[in-house]
Amino acid sequence: MNRKLGLLLTIVLALTVSACGNKKDSGAVSDTTTTAPVSEDTSNQTLFNTGLTAQELRDLGIEGDPLNYKVLYFEYNSSAIDRRSTVIAKRHAQYLGANGGARVTLEGHADERGTRDYNLALGERRAQAVAEFMNSEGAQSTIQTISYGEERPADPAHTEAAWQQNRRVEIKY
């Protein structure tokens, strides 16, 4: 259901952007004798109200609309939101601001290192950091936070790669 909603929003946004780009000034005179299409250089246009170009989004590991990403990752023993996660959280805040009745739960997680109590507190700090950021970016909705600590790993392996996947906040609509 959430994927369908995200896909629908992406399609509506794409249609809106393309429709706005095709509008002509009502006072303009159209030259219908021109047959060669005019190509625009879109490499420097910002996308999805992020202030970033497609290449800048790709450099952050984001393909397409950041609203389609629902997991934010964190460094070891940190609740600081990195640049990539900031872009994703900002797009979700914009969505929530435009849909005031929307409800979202931010699920904080930690890797298995540390005590159970410490990891629960760290997961809560991460979820709260994202909630505070989203609220500061205009999210006008009910944001609930919950921490699962190390209890629900995305990857149960005991490797650095697995731990990186487990240090996260999941955005659940």
Image (spheres, rainbow, N blue to C red):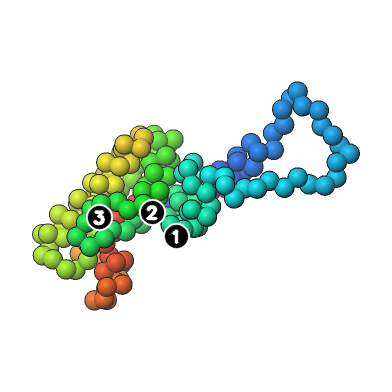
Q: Position of residue 43 (x, y in %)?
A: 59, 50
**In front here: 132 or 38?**
38
The answer to whether 121 is drawn above or below residue 165 in the figure is above
Residue depicted at x 49% and y 58%: 58
Residue depicted at x 33% and y 41%: 134
Q: Name the mark on residue 19.
A: none
Q: Position of residue 16 (x, y in %)?
A: 60, 39
Chain-order first, disc 1 or disc 3 = 1
Q: Residues within 10 Å of mark 1 (few under 14, many from 20)?
A: few
Q: Is residue 96 left or right of residue 158?
A: right
Question: Disc 3 versus disc 2: distance between alpha carbons?
Answer: 17 Å
Residue depicted at x 62% and y 48%: 42
The answer to whether 135 is drawn above or below residue 109 in the figure is above
The answer to whether 137 is drawn above or below residue 47 in the figure is above
Residue depicted at x 60% and y 41%: 17
Q: In the displayed orientation, state which residue is furthest to the top.
A: 27
Q: Which residue is mark 3?
A: 108
Chain-order first, disc 3 or disc 2 = 2
| Three-letter code, disc 3 | Gly
| Three-letter code, disc 1 | Gly
Q: Does residue 4 appear in this view?
A: no
**In front here: 151 or 23?**
23
Q: Answer yes or no: do the residues labelled 2 and 1 have beta carbons within 8 Å? A: yes
Q: Is residue 129 left or right of residue 93?
A: left
Among the 4 quarters of the image, the one containing residue 15: top right
Q: Residues within 10 Å of mark 2 (few under 14, many from 20)?
A: some
Q: Which residue is mark 2?
A: 84
Chain-order first, disc 2 or disc 1 = 1
Q: Which residue is mark 1?
A: 61
Q: Position of residue 131 (x, y in %)?
A: 28, 44
